[in-house]
Amino acid sequence: MDLDRYNYLQKRDIKLAQIIPDQMLQVMEMLIHWIFQVGEQNNLEIKTIELAAILSKLYLSKQLIDSDKVDLIGIVSIMISIKFNECQNKIQMNIQDCVNQCQSKYSSKEITDMEMSLLSLIEYDANMTTITDYYDGEAVQIDLVLFVTLDSEFLYFQKYELYEAIRNFYSKDTSNLSENTKNIISRISAKINQLTANDVSNTPKIKKKIIKKKGLRRSKIYSSQSITL
């Protein structure tokens, strides 16, 4: 990656400045896992899933909202992310799709109002850096990218910090890495070991994959599960 692109990505690399209250963290993690499930079922780009997670986290860090309405943030974040990042893949998601996804829990006006609220919060600029943006044709350890996206322990790191840790996760020589990168690698390793110890069947299956552009398709967003938080 050339230096100009790297510097540009860092400028758009959002860091959460406000702390999300502890009582909301568990709800937020459930929401991000649901976003991942919807993304996986609909073959969305990893960047789309990451962006939806960023938008949801950003809103929850800056706005007070009842926990029973967190799902509204999630579905609107997915819709905005799809509009921004999936246009070439012809994936559609409109207000009525959101109403259907939430099983009519929210009206089209409530969804529109939330969309405007979220867009206003980000000043109508959804071009935010994700971890995968830093990969420039490199092999991407997708499971690790999703792992740190889903886990609230890595909530307050910037994306380039997580990228450096993931890229060097399997490096045998860590002498040239920053202390911050070593710290993140240590946290990821400890978390994986903890999950492995708790349930062998849940051992993360880390894999590498080249991100390629997908062929054009036209489809509606769907999920086999409703949001239950």
Image (tube, rainbow, N blue to C red):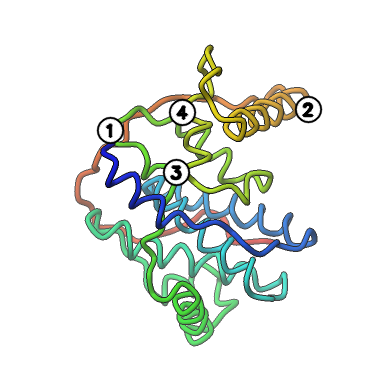
Q: Earlier in the sequence, mark 3 or mark 4?
A: 3
Secondary structure state at the residue bearing disc 3 = helix
Q: Which mark is residue 137?
A: 1
Query: Which residue is denoted by mark 2 in the rendering?
Result: 198
Marks 3,4: beta carbons within 8 A: no
Q: Where is residue 147 in the image (x, y as percent from the top left)?
A: 57, 38
Say what amino acid the circle numbered 1 marks: Gly
Q: Is residue 190 left or right of residue 129?
A: right
Say what amino acid the circle numbered 2 marks: Asn
Q: Which residue is drawn at 61% across and 28% down?
A: 182
Query: Which residue is denoted by mark 4 in the rendering?
Result: 167
Marks 4,2: beta carbons within 8 A: no
Secondary structure state at the residue bearing disc 2 = helix
Q: Which residue is drawn at 29% across and 41% down?
A: 3
Q: Where is residue 164 in the image (x, y as percent from the top left)?
A: 48, 33
Q: Which residue is drawn at 62% across and 71% down?
A: 62
Q: Where is residue 32 in the image (x, y as percent from the top left)?
A: 59, 53
Q: Which is closer to the viewer, label 4 or label 2?
A: 4
| Quadrant showing the N terminus | top left
Query: Which residue is denoted by mark 3 in the rendering?
Result: 131
Q: Which residue is drawn at 40% across and 67% down?
A: 80
Q: Which mark is residue 174?
A: none
Say what amino acid the circle numbered 4 marks: Arg
| Quadrant showing the C terminus | bottom right
Marks 3,2: beta carbons within 8 A: no
